[in-house]
Image: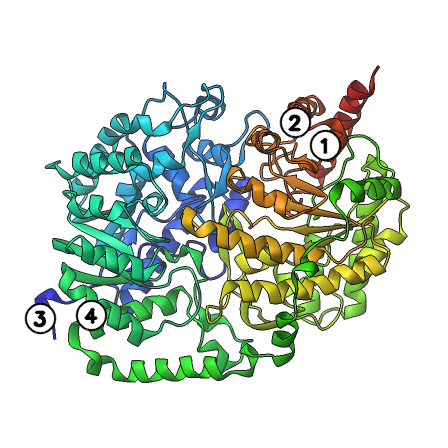
Amino acid sequence: MTTESAAARATVHGYPRQGQQRELKKAIEGYWRGRVTADSLKATAGDLRRTHWRQLADAGVHEVPTGDFSYYDHVLDTTVMVGAIPERHRAAVAADALDRYFAMARGTQEVAPLEMTKWFDTNYHYLVPELGPDTVFAADSTKQVAELKEALALGLSARPVLVGPVTYLLLAKPAPGVAAGFDPLTLLDRLLPVYAEVLADLRAAGAEWVQLDEPALVQDRTPAELGAAERACRALGVLTDRPKLLVAGYFDRLGDALPVLAKAPVEGLAIDFTEAAAANLDALAAVGGLPGKRLVAGVVNGRNIWVNDLEKSLATLGTLLGLADRVDVAASCSLLHVPLDAASEHDIEPQILRWLSFARQKTAEVVTLARGLTHGTEAIAPSLAANRADLASRAASPLTHDAAVRARTSTVTDSDARRSQPYAERTTAQRTRLALPLLPTTTVGSFPQTTELRTARADLKAARIGTAGYEERVRNEIREVVAFQEKTGLDVLVHGEAERNDMVQYFAEQLTGYLATQHGWVQSYGTRYVRPPILAGDISRPEPMTVRWTAYAQSLTSRPVKGMLTGPVTMLAWSFVRDDQPLPDTARQVALALRDEVADLEAAGTPVIQVDEPALRETLPLRAADRAAYLEWATEAFRLTTCGVRPDTQIHTHMCYAEFGDIVEAIDDLDADVISLEAARSHMQVARELAAHGYPRDAGPGVYDIHSPRVPSAAETAELLRTGLGAIPAERLWVNPDCGLKTRGWPETRSALENMVAAARAVRREVSAP
């Protein structure tokens, strides 16, 4: 038993921001619409922070995080903290810091927002810093100091959490107009004094510890990048006017970065012992542990929702006791990536609910483990017994084992994942069948989810209307969407997805093996929250899911209508996936269920079928050594879904808001006939990447950024389209938005798509002219 003076402390790296009823989302969106004042928004935010800190403290957390709360994104908060605000945003909203903040996130009609992409291999999106050789940093610790003082005023022990300087620069991109080849990491020596000033401010405000998040160090890093990390830790570590420093790396193994951090003059490390736990344990032992330092051991998975195996975690913690001066217990990363409270889920069967652990339950697990580490297993014997029973219940459940599904999966052959003809032959048949013009126009799938649609869905759930009444409202919406597309002049139409609550949840609710939550909201970006379904058991499709709505839309027009499905990798990535079998096995089950839907769409006469895989890049392992195996099963799952169709059925796929350069070969291996990709914010970068690879199929790099409320003019859209033509020949170039239009309003959607079609027609005339 450890002594009380060395008692293990419980902590977390961050907490969900939204509130139990998504109060933050509602307040921010109300502010954008002019219905909520800035003071009221700030009051709501303050109430949420204090509520969350009290929840953590009441649960037994000894040290609460501060600074992780954000109106939009913590990387954007860091950009403000270091003064790296692009000049266009300073000029556009010079008088109001809050409006300037939101202008960087969302843009205005006058200025474009910052680029947005995925936070490592999660579904959280961050705003990419824009830096150049002329960037001037200036410290602004106002937010970080204020939130620390708020927590201290409540009598809490608090630890500010900052994005570390190396990760911040590695996440950044050269600003528009900066010469190619500029490396933001060259700005490190200019940035470190700003961090030193922020640390001094936090020390003066009462911080004992400050956490510097450096998750970029779990990726493959060059000697120069590891040298930058060593230099940063040394420069900040030798400061005299600073708090103690805790450097955190999570999401994977630290590898070569661990010796650098172990030797650095910082007082503690926070390490993930759930992702690549064995590798981090071995590496920590190899460097001789962390003598004289604090180790915050992330033994509770901060990214998934399954109950922790407490005995296994205690064994890991026991091994770590001899490797550091003190060992504290934490979740592996911020709990931002999981819902708030499983106790709010009243529609899940009680025994199954005991398998689940959301942020509040994970907090309790951390506290229990800290108590067990301090006082021994006898102090937590009832918790251990209940935990064993919950784990056994899940392992024995018929939900997790369907003999028919497993038998079907075992019979899959390589030929099931190959088209019957190569692309060069298929495309001739498809062009004959579809008869599309040069530079064909389409959308990615969804149209605005109006208040009327959401109200209808709520009315159906509350039994205020019946199924027949709800479906008539959906049919009305489909008629309007199809009529608008025909009038606007789009070439390949969609039905608009009026019936869908979410691109993953909609399908999960119709597949066996999935669980749906009512309050399991997780932040995707800004005020966009999703409810990832829970992939708990073996997957099958009892009946068609989309065919009747697609067929109905096709009955309203002579133009081709796309069938719209979410692909198997995205179904996994945007769900909380089961952890009791290998991911490739789960992916194959989902792919076979979707293959049945593709077959039924084709049989109903659907000429174009789009299977979206926006998460293919997102789920790419952080270490290069792990990527080949992942891409092999991921691309096979897509082909297994799509390769049973005739040659003249055109298969589309879609990807958005990720760095595509790392997976261009995998995009090719999907063997889709057409791919649409996000490209507007990155100024057609992906088109150039496809061209450099020699991508041989049709592609539609997006010309309209749907994550911003600004409407690009026809001239602006045409210019972006011409940039795309510089990389992709006209006979293989499609014209489409970056992504679906679900989150946009109808007025801006109408204007943007009308401008897009006008731009396509103008450029079509240019390339067709003799």
How far across and down, in percent of the image, does residue 74 sit?
39, 43
In terms of sequence position, does the residue under pointer 3 or pointer 4 come before the other?
Answer: 3
Q: For numbered disc 4, what is the local secondary structure?
A: helix
Residue 130 occupies quadrant: top left
User: In this view of the protein, which residue sits in the foreground, 621 or 353?
Assistant: 621
In terms of sequence position, does the residue under pointer 2 or pointer 1 come before the other?
Answer: 2
Callout in the foreground (2, 3): 2
Q: Which mark is residue 245?
A: none
Which residue is painted at 63% across and 70% down in the image?
Answer: 409
Q: Amino acid at mark 2?
A: Gly
Q: Which residue is mark 2?
A: 724
Which residue is painted at 85% across and 40% down in the image?
Answer: 486
Q: Are marks 2 and 1 in contact (CB under 8 Å)?
A: yes
Q: Which mark is residue 733?
A: 1
- Mark 4: few/some/many CA within 10 Å (<14, 14-19, 20+): few
Q: Amino acid at mark 1?
A: Leu
Callout in the foreground (3, 1): 1
In terms of sequence position, does the residue under pointer 3 or pointer 1 come before the other?
Answer: 3
Q: Amino acid at mark 3?
A: Thr
In the picture, measured across the screen, residue 129 lies left or right of residue 34, that is: left
